[in-house]
Image (cartoon, rainbow, N blue to C red):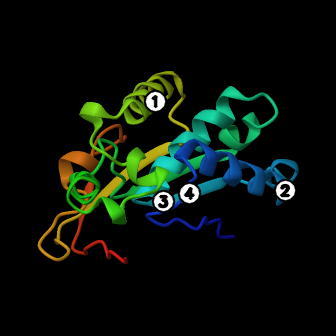
Amino acid sequence: GVLSFPASRSDRLSIPQVARILLRDLRDAGVMEDQLQLYFIAHSLGGLAVKEMMLTARENQGLRSIFEQTRGIFFISTPTSGSEAAEFISNKIPKLATGRLMADLKTIGENSFLQSLQERWDDLRRIRDKQPGIYCAYETKSTHGLMVVPQQYAEKFCDEAPEALKVAVLLFF
């Protein structure tokens, strides 16, 4: 099945809130009772939500089986270190960047949420027993002259070197 969440630049939800919604949806769909093998393919912001979702599931006894049932995660252009595009939009066109999700995407240097997420994710990677497998890819084409999630922002904390995809992120405003 497909699990998704609506997101917009004015969304008031934080990434941890989105992760909790996704976990609830998985639980309500019965994946814990069915003991399914889970695989996640996450693009951009969705990758941050999946990371938070996996960390929350692992830390919560009532949801831990979601983490344990997950066999693989494929992140596509997940901005593990934030996005300079989000930073640019927030600084230059603040009326377009009114939501919490845009704040969560600012570059990691001044982003305590991403700093914490990276630390927790790195801890999880070190203690897991190669499950779930963690794979990454990044986009190589710019969108309107801007690389939304460049390689160095998308390649951290994967099991193998990330794959280059000859596609670009589409921005809708």
Q: Mark 2 points at which residue?
A: 28
Q: Nearer the viewer, residue 139 or 133?
A: 139
Q: What residue type is labelled 2?
A: Asp
Q: How far apart are marks 2 and 4 (CA)?
A: 17 Å
- Mark 3 to mark 1 CA distance (whole Å): 17 Å
Dot 3: few (<14), some (14–19), or many (≥20) neighbours within 10 Å?
Answer: many
Please tell me which residue is depicted at 61% across the width and 66% down the height of the picture: 4
For marks 4 and 1 on the same chain, the one whose residue lies earlier in the sequence: 4
Q: Which of marks 2 and 4 is nearer the N terminus?
A: 2
Residue at image x 58%, y 42%? 16
Mark 1 secondary-structure assignment? helix
Q: Position of residue 98 (x, y in %)?
A: 42, 57
Task: Judge depth for marks 1 and 2 and give the one in front.
Answer: 2
Work out whether residue 74 can be spotted.
no
| Marks 2/3: CA–CA distance | 20 Å
State the residue in front, 158 or 2. 2
Q: Do the CB atoms of the residues marked 3 and 4 lie less than 8 Å apart?
A: yes
Give amino acid for label 3: Ala
Q: Can the viewer see residue 18?
A: yes
What residue is shown at x 66% (from left), y 39% (from top)? 67
Expressed as whole percent of the image width and height from the top left, the position of residue 91 reads 23, 53
Q: Name the residue under label 1.
A: 125
In this view, the mark in front (2 or 4)? 2
Circle nearer the N terminus (2, 3): 2
Number of numbered discs on residues: 4
156 shown above or below 84: above
- The residue carrying mark 3 is 42
In the shown orientation, is residue 43 left or right of residue 64? Answer: left
Amino acid type for the residue under numbered disc 4: Phe
Query: Which label lies toward us, 3 or 4?
Result: 3
- Which type of secondary structure does the marked residue at label 4 adopt? strand
Q: How crowded is mark 2: few (under 14 residues within 10 Å), some or many (20 or more)?
A: few
